[in-house]
Image (cartoon, grey):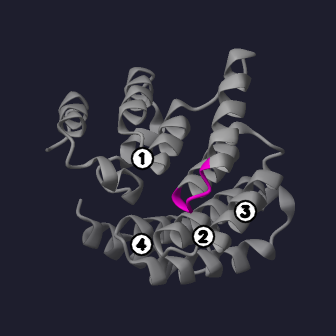
Amino acid sequence: MSSDEQLAFENRILGFDPHNPLANFSYAETLFLARQYDAALAQYQKTLNIVSGLPPQYSGALVDWIHSGLGQVYLQKGMFPEAITEFNKARELTEDLPPAWEELGYAYAKSGQRDEATRILNQLQERAKRGEYVLPLGIAWIYIGLGDKDQAFVWLDKSFAERSDGMREIKTNPIYDPLRSDPRFTDLLRRMRLPT
């Protein structure tokens, strides 16, 4: 299904249930992946407004996802302070679990704050050595942000080996744009049985 078809489908769902938080979040995410950043930003903010009126037991993880989504949009728009603020909100909501740190490390790397990104990268690798699960894909993102393609592919291969769910967006997520012209990226798509 193309992104236009996906957007049309999700828009129809919202026509039947315009205040459904998950449907609104999904629509925002699809707008982001379709690179419609202004529309995605507005949709994430609308979803946050919907969710803020719900009891915490219904909105818990979704609020974290919305702040992460907002951070990703701000990054693509070059609004680095706003992105870092959103990723910090997500980190606070997840009680310091590694995925929020991974996104924050990527944001610092993209914004040129290499020392902060490297500090987070080292922290995450230390946590992994202690036996805590750290998403290899998140480590790959930080290396992508730092411009270290060799290490990015090492960690993408680890993500592929463990069949990480996050790899499903590899064809559309702008995070991977710096790697698309590299033959190793084409090889990875081939191994994932995706069109190159």
Main secondary structure found in the magenta portion: loop
Which residues are drawn in magenta? 110-114
Q: Are marks 1 and 4 in contact (CB under 8 Å)?
A: no
User: Rounded to the nearest whole Å, what is the CA distance between mark 4 and mark 2?
Assistant: 20 Å
Residue ID for mark 3 = 63
Residue 5 seen in this snapshot:
yes
Type of amino acid under label 4 = Leu
Name the residue: 46% across, 32% down: 164
User: Rounded to the nearest whole Å, what is the CA distance between mark 1 and mark 3?
Assistant: 30 Å
Question: Which of the two discs, 3 and 2, sits closer to the camera?
Answer: 2
Between 126 and 11, the residue placed more toward the observer is 126
Residue ID for mark 1 = 147
User: Rounded to the nearest whole Å, what is the CA distance between mark 3 and mark 2?
Assistant: 20 Å
Quick one: label 1 or label 3, which is nearer the N terminus? 3
Q: Secondary structure at mark 1?
A: loop
Q: Secondary structure at mark 2?
A: helix
Quick one: label 4 or label 3, which is nearer the N terminus? 4
